[in-house]
Image (cartoon, helix red, strand yellow):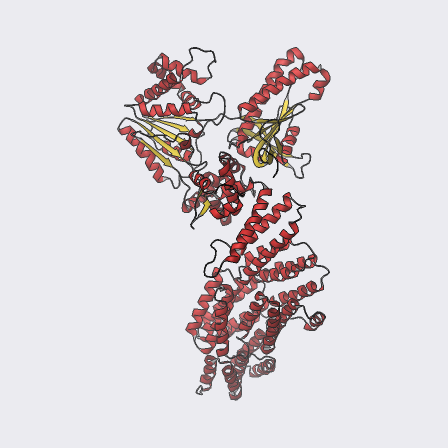
């Protein structure tokens, strides 16, 4: 930034427009001098109200006045100040009009619009201040839409002031320059500034210890007839007022309670809390006044309104203090007294002196002063409460997570009309997002339940006001910390400070003192005490600064990650940090510097980093993260870039693994739109579509046309790699496992030539799964599993299919106990990583293990469960195969009729090759049981023909053994088929199955 003076700042402010109605007509009728005189009186009346309520006149536009609230510093009640200003100014205009009408024949009226939102503020308050943003336009358009005498509020202003304003919603307004209709409310009136009794039924949660301490000090003051003082501290919304209400509700009926609040603005507000207390005892005032005496009565009466400046008899500070002390004494002599003084952080020093004076000098009367304030009270008055015999200071901290969960549940129950009872996501967002602050929880719940995605304006106002009270050094450090993230280190913040700036240690200590940050878990680290504070600081920081800082942080994290070693990795850095900051830098630069010559290079870096991180997430099967990262990378890259082919395949893989077939196809559609003329992209997408169709149960395509298209581009390693994977799956589906093995190995060569670890591991995983059915002996398959378990040791997602394969091979060899343990581990990993398809495969293989163990009912249940899950995710053909297996288990339990029914029920669904073979064998067995031997032998002949097309030893053994059983039932010699079945099992190393055949034949197993 260049130039001098305050830098432009993002702020949440309230903008008020007020304008005279019919000013053109007035100008036409009146002499210019008279018109000027009237306008000057109008301007003066409005300026007075604006100034008294803490606003700033930003500009005059003809007869219109634009005022802003929240400049130079935001206050949480800026919206209320603006509404009260508008209400008072409108009354002043009407009074002026009534005064002018008889003498000038002038009918004077005005209309007003008020809006709240984010703007840029340039310059200091005064003639040079400029406020830029859509909020200004909205306020101006609302003022134009208001009829004579009306004040229209934008939706966020209405939300901010509804506790003090009487509002009436108007139909959505079509405002000039606004794309969508704008919700607005008409200000009908203003309510008195009084606490209203709580009408809800939500119990006090998590404050039992604080309530006990308040009760104890009150009991002590009562017992010893002395003045006690309890100072209750806490940040806005933490529940101070709620705790005080609960304490007051529990008091005996004979206790008198006087309450007064310090206003944040206004002329003559020093004794406003005392004046409120005096108003509360109106009915008892004659008796109290008599006991006070004339001097004290006169002093207290003077607090009801400002005394004239030249009133020589106006009471002085000492007289007022004496009168207030006497007032409390008189009330407390009649009955025990509790005095509640709220918002003491806004009290004038004179009032603080008076309270301490009362606490020190009240004697022999039971009085408890409950002083409610924010922590900054002790900055104003560090010695507050010191030296008192009966005093305590109590600071409310955030509610614990369990207590927040209880509170949110109660709030949701109270708002059952708008909050669904089963909306767990909403519960969690509110409970965790509110950071232990009850008010924030209530506001967030209300906002989220209404479907709004932005931070509630009340929270923005509260936090913005708190931040504006910080010193310049603290604010600068906090802005940089918010750019780093919720957690940050001193070193990270220092990296963003300008050269020669002081170390951030001292400001960080002051921010700790202000409860905005706290120590983190690691040495030198900190974290924001509230997530919403961090979000607000970040949102109110210049986007241009944020863009540069994010870029700096990306470099900073990248340098440290590159310099880390396996023995001494840098704590807190990762490629994810680099991607996060690059993405933010890229987006912000596009918004505020779209012509930046470095934007293209920044975009390329961000996209490459996101794709790298997304690829790593996909590799470890963190599917939601993978999809999110890859889609972000795709979003950044312009159309026509070759990386879109790579992205399409990866996103499609991830969606398929999640069971989202339609989204997997959509990823390919998107790539074809972004690379419509790239032959490699179109061919790769075509191959991937065939993979998706095959995995969902469709028959494999003819590979010839795809091979011919690839032959024209022999160096397209990704295309060939994917083609070989498709080729392998088609061979597997047809039971040709030797051919599938060769296809996987061809694909593996292509993956290695690309140096693509993801594709290589996919193919290794495919080879590993293949050994369950291929000619590879069990021993060799277990050796391959051991190698891959070591290779994938740090990646549980890749371990799952290896553990499942290992379990099946162990079961075939007869080691059922170890097989079950391997499946237990795989199931745990699949559940922890939310790997839905892998979890289904685990259930399927459990069915096989239980079948081999002879527990056919358990096996049937498991096969059925896996089939139902597969159907849910759209895998019809594998599901139909498992339903055949379940029917076979029913038959093995001797229930022929039920097996027949189950098999017939699932006839309509196409099955995999092995499923069709198993179905033929089951039908043959059913026919044999019914004495239909000719039918059974015919089915056996058909099965014998079909198994010649497969080289799966166990599948061949299963069918040959089924044929042997049919032959025996028909009175034929089963020996040949049985021996061939045993030999097939033994060639695989499936000793458990081979032993079963030998036992059936009555032969010893070699």
409, 719: nearer the viewer: 719
Quadrant (top left/top right/bottom left/bottom right) for the N terminus: top right
Tell me if residue 510 comes above or below residue 348 in the rendering: below
Q: Is residue 116 left or right of residue 243?
A: right
Q: Against 674, is 111 above or below?
A: above
Can residue 392 be spotted in the picture?
A: yes
Residue 402, placed above or below residue 736: above
**Residue at 58% over, 59% down:** 612
Q: Is residue 390 left or right of residue 56?
A: left
Q: How many marks?
A: 0
Can see residue 864?
A: no
Quarter of the view holding residue 651: bottom right
Left or right, 36 with respect to 569, comes to right
Q: Where in the figure is residue 447, as x and y percent of width and height?
A: 53, 41
Residue 324 % position (x, y) = 37, 20
Residue reaching furthest front?
A: 500
Q: Position of residue 189 (x, y in %)?
A: 55, 25
Q: Where's the C terminus, which quadrant?
A: bottom left
Q: Residue at x 58, y 20 (%)?
A: 91
- Tell me where residue 450 appears, x and y as whole percent: 55, 42
> Compared to 75, does 269 lie above or below?
above
Which of the two residues, 561 or 287, is positioned nearer the viewer here? 561
The quarter of the displayed image where residue 616 is located: bottom right
**Residue in the foreground of this view, choosing between 120 and 888:** 120
613, 110: nearer the viewer: 613
Residue 745 quadrant: bottom right
Q: Residue furthest left?
A: 224
């Amino acid at each position: 930034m260049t130039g001098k003076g305050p830098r432009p700042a993002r702020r949440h402010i309230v903008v008020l427009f007020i304008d005279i109605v019919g000013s053109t007509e007035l100008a036409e009728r009146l002499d210019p001098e008279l018109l000027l005189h009237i306008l000057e009186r109008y301007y003066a009346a409005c300026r007075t109200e604006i100034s008294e309520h803490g606003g700033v006149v930003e500009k005059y536009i003809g007869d219109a006045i634009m005022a802003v609230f929240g400049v130079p510093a935001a206050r949480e009640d800026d919206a209320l100040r603006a509404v009260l200003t508008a209400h008072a100014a409108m009354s002043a205009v009407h009074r002026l009009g009534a005064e002018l009408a008889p003498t000038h024949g002038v009918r004077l009226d005005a209309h007003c619009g008020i809006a709240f939102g984010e703007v840029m503020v340039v310059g200091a308050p005064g003639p040079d201040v400029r406020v830029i943003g859509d909020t200004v336009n909205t306020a101006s358009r609302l003022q134009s839409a208001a009829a004579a005498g009306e004040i229209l509020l934008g939706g966020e202003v209405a939300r901010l002031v509804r506790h003090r304003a009487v509002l009436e919603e108007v139909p959505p307004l079509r405002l000039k320059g606004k794309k969508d209709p704008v919700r607005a409310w008409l200000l009908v009136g203003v309510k008195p500034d009084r606490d209203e009794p709580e009408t809800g039924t939500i119990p006090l949660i998590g404050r039992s210890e604080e309530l006990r301490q308040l009760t104890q000090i009150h009991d002590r003051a009562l017992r010893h007839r002395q003045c006690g003082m309890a100072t209750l501290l806490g940040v806005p919304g933490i529940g101070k007022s709620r705790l005080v209400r609960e304490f007051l509700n529990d008091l005996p009926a004979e206790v008198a309670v006087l309450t007064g609040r310090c206003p944040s603005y206004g002329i003559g507000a020093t004794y406003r809390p005392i004046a409120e207390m005096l108003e509360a005892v109106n009915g008892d005032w004659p008796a109290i006044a008599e006991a006070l005496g004339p001097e004290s009565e006169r002093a207290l009466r003077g607090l009801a309104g400002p005394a004239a400046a030249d009133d020589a008899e106006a009471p002085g500070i000492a007289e007022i203090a004496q009168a207030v002390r006497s007032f409390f004494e008189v009330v407390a002599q009649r009955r025990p007294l509790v005095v509640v003084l709220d918002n003491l952080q806004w009290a004038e020093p004179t009032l603080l002196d008076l309270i301490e004076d009362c606490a020190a000098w009240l004697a022999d009367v039971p009085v408890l002063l409950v002083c409610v304030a924010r922590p900054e009270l002790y900055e104003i008055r560090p010695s507050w409460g010191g030296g008192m015999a009966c005093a305590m200071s109590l600071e409310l901290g955030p509610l614990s997570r369990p207590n927040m969960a209880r509170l949110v549940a109660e709030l949701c129950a109270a708002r059952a009309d708008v909050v669904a009872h089963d909306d767990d996501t909403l519960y969690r967002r509110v409970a965790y997002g509110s950071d232990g602050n009850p008010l924030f929880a209530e506001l967030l719940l209300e906002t989220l339940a209404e479907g709004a995605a932005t931070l509630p304006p009340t929270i923005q106002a509260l936090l913005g006001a708190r931040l504006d009270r910080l010193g310049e050094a603290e604010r600068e450090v906090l802005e940089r910390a918010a750019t780093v993230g919720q957690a940050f280190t001193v070193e990270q913040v220092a990296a963003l400070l300008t050269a020669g700036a002081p170390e951030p240690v001292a400001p960080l200590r002051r921010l700790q003192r202000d409860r905005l940050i706290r120590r983190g878990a690691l040495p030198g680290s900190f974290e924001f005490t509230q997530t919403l504070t961090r979000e607000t600081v970040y949102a109110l920081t210049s986007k241009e600064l944020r863009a540069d800082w994010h870029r700096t942080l990306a470099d900073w994290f990248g340098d440290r990650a590159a310099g880390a070693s396996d023995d001494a990795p840098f704590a807190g850095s990762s490629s994810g940090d680099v991607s996060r900051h690059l993405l933010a830098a890229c987006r912000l630069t596009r918004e505020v510097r779209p012509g930046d010559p470095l934007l293209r290079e920044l975009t390329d870096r961000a996209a490459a980093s996101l794709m790298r991180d997304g690829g790593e997430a996909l590799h470890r099967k963190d599917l939601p993260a993978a999809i999110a990262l890859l889609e972000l990378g795709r979003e950044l890259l312009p159309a026509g870039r070759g990386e879109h082919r790579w992205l399409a395949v990866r996103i499609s893989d991830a969606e398929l693994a999640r069971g989202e077939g339609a989204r997997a196809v959509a990823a390919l559609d998107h790539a074809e739109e972004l690379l419509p003329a790239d032959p490699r992209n179109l061919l790769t997408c075509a191959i991937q579509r065939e993979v998706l169709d095959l995995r969902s149960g469709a028959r494999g395509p003819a590979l010839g046309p795809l091979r011919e298209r690839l032959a024209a581009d022999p160096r397209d390693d990704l295309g060939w790699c994917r083609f070989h994977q498709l080729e392998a799956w088609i061979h597997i589906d047809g039971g040709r496992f030797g051919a599938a093995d060769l296809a996987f190995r061809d694909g593996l060569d292509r993956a290695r030539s690309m140096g693509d670890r993801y594709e290589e591991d996919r193919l290794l995983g495919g080879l590993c799964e293949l050994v369950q059915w291929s000619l590879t002996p069990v021993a060799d398959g277990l050796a391959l599993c051991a190698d891959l378990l070591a290779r994938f040791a740090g990646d549980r997602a890749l371990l799952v299919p290896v553990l499942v394969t290992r379990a099946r091979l162990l079961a075939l060899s007869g080691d059922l106990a170890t097989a079950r343990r391997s499946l237990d581990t795989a199931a745990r990993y699949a559940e922890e990583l939310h790997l839905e398809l892998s979890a289904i495969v685990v259930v399927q293989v459990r069915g096989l293990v239980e079948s081999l163990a002879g527990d056919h009912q358990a096996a049937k249940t498991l096969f059925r469960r896996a089939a139902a899950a597969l159907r849910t995710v759209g895998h019809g053909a594998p599901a139909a195969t498992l339903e055949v297996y379940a029917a076979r288990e029913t038959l093995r339990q001797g229930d022929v009729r039920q097996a027949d029914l189950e098999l017939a029920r699932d006839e309509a669904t196409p099955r995999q090759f092995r499923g069709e073979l198993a179905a033929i064998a089951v039908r043959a067995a059913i026919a044999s049981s019914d004495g239909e031997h000719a039918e059974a032998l015919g089915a056996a002949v058909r099965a014998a023909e079909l198994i010649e097309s497969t080289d799966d030893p166990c599948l061949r053994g299963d069918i040959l053994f089924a044929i042997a059983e049919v032959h025996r039932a028909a009175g034929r010699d089963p020996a040949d088929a049985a021996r061939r079945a045993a030999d097939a099992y033994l060639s695989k190393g499936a000793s458990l199955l081979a032993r079963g055949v030998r036992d059936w034949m009555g032969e010893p197993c070699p």
